[in-house]
Image (cartoon, rainbow, N blue to C red):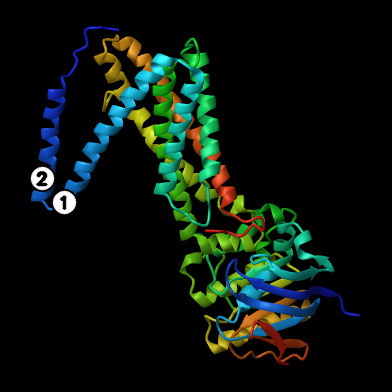
Amino acid sequence: MPHTILKLHDVSFNYPGENTILQDMNLEINRNDLIIIKGESGAGKSTFLQLFNRFCDSSKGRILFHEKDLNKYKIDQIRRSLIYLPQLPVAIEGTIEKNLAFPFSFHSHKNKKFNPVKAREWLDYFQLNLPLHHDGLKLSIGQKQRIALIRSILLEPEVLLLDEPGSALDSNNKRLIEQKIEHIIDSTNVTVLMATHSEVSFTGTHYRILRLKDKNLMVEQ
Amino acid sequence: MNSEIINISWLNVAVTTLLVIAAGICSLLLKLRLEKDIVTGTIRAFVQLFLLGYVLKTVFALNNPFIVFLLFSMMIYFAASIISGRVKERSVPYFLPVLASMFLSYIVINTFVMTVIIQVKPWYKPVYFIPIGGMIIGNSMNALAIAIHIWFETLKKERDRIGLYLSLGATPEESTSENFKSAIKSGMIPSINALMSVGVVSIPGMMTGQILAGVSPLIAIKYQIVIMLLLVGSTALSTVFAMHIVRRLSFTTGQQLKV
């Protein structure tokens, strides 16, 4: 029996005093699922992902994480377990190593330690043949996007919330990233929710495509 | 005090407005468009100082702790209004909390100076309490306005980075530690600079006043030293205190950045 990791019960969202963006959504997500959220730009894909790491708080309904209301968790527990990757990758001043290692200094990750050997392996895995001391600000957007992904993977979250991870990449690199994500899901326990407005190239059979349309989710595949 | 201090006649005060008229003419000739502000500023200075003169005269004569407290509170209220007028941030309503923090820190500091350092009796004696309190408020007000301005500016500029830090599990404090430090530092630098340059670059206002009133420069310097150190201390205390509150208000309970 697959373990349900996330559950949405009639979840709606609107910014205070503004129109509803997402309405009465219901969804169950199992551990190790790969969920693709498609939709036009402005359909609310980013908002949808941000409901899970509490960057946005639902205005109605409940979100359950391991059967417990998301609002009952401490924020640091949520952000340690469900990591959101913004559409535009942000690099901080310093080397690639610093860009990968800085979250390990946060209190919420105090039990983890940055492992440069592992970081190197992931860089190679994502075909980033750059030394760890390379300047993080001198990377291209596509490289920054991959660094951002590796940074999140190194923190070993339970759920990865990827907001258009291939948006700044050419089709070859986008396909590469998608292949790698699929491979990571196969080899680990991670659950991935990925927003995109373009076609995806996943080859496995266990992914689900949902479309955000008219403020709600529809099963597409 | 020297009772033979020269009293400037009102005619001579009026003569000094010639200098302001000269400034206005410069503005007109150079098309600086400052003439309106110069006129308004001059009128405001006259009216405000006139009122202040009479208010102080009355408050000094009454020597009543409640009246002193009331005047002091009004001064703090005006200072907080000036700050919130200068640094506008709709998403973070900081006026009341900052007013409360200013109130608390200035009351503590001013009372400490009155009772422990100057040892005035009674401790609320308005001749001491109000002017020294005024200096504390004026100085800290500028520091706070600068600190709050820098805080919001850097938050807006670094919104993406802060969002990234938060999404990776950082607390609001961790994600804005540098912004917080630079805001407080920027607020404090002017008072520290004043500490460095005092007596070399300028003779400070209070010391000038005391010397003109016939006080020995050796007594005046003691007051000045106390004031300078007091200003650095009160600026630091009130800025750090208020900035902690502003930082807390800049995030929601769900640790989302409001700005």
Name the residue at the right extreme: A1
Q: Nearer the viewer, residue A3 or B77?
A: B77
Left or right of A58 on screen, residue B64: left
Crowding at dot 1, Cα within 10 Å, few <14 / some 14-19 / many 20+, comes out as few
Q: Position of residue A97 (x, y in %)?
A: 58, 62
Q: Nearer the viewer, residue B153 or B174?
A: B153
Q: For the point 57% across and 59% down, which residue is it? A: B257
Circle 2 sits in a helix, a strand or a loop, which is it? helix
Q: Which residue position holds label 2?
A: B26
Q: Which residue position holds label 1?
A: B32
Q: For the point 54% across and 37% down, which residue is it? A: B101
Left or right of A76 on screen, residue B145: left
Q: For the point 40% across and 39% down, which residue is it? A: B142
Circle 1 sits in a helix, a strand or a loop, which is it? loop
Kind of residue at disc 1: Leu
The answer to whether any part of residue A212 appears in the image is yes
Kind of residue at disc 2: Cys
Picture quadrant of residue A119: bottom right
Q: State how far apart marks 2 and 1 are (Cα).
A: 8 Å
Residue B74 to residue B203: above or below: below
Quadrant position of the N terminus of chain A in the picture: bottom right
Left or right of B19 on screen, residue B99: right
Q: Position of residue A184 (x, y in %)?
A: 73, 78
Q: Nearer the viewer, residue A204 or B149?
A: B149
Residue A68 to residue A36: above or below: above
For the residues tagged 2 and 1, is the chain the same?
A: yes
Residue A72 to residue A164: above or below: above
Q: Position of residue B245 (x, y in %)?
A: 57, 44
Q: Are marks 2 and 1 in contact (CB under 8 Å)?
A: yes
Left or right of B211 on screen, residue B32: left
The answer to whether any part of residue A95 appears in the image is no
Picture quadrant of residue B126: top left
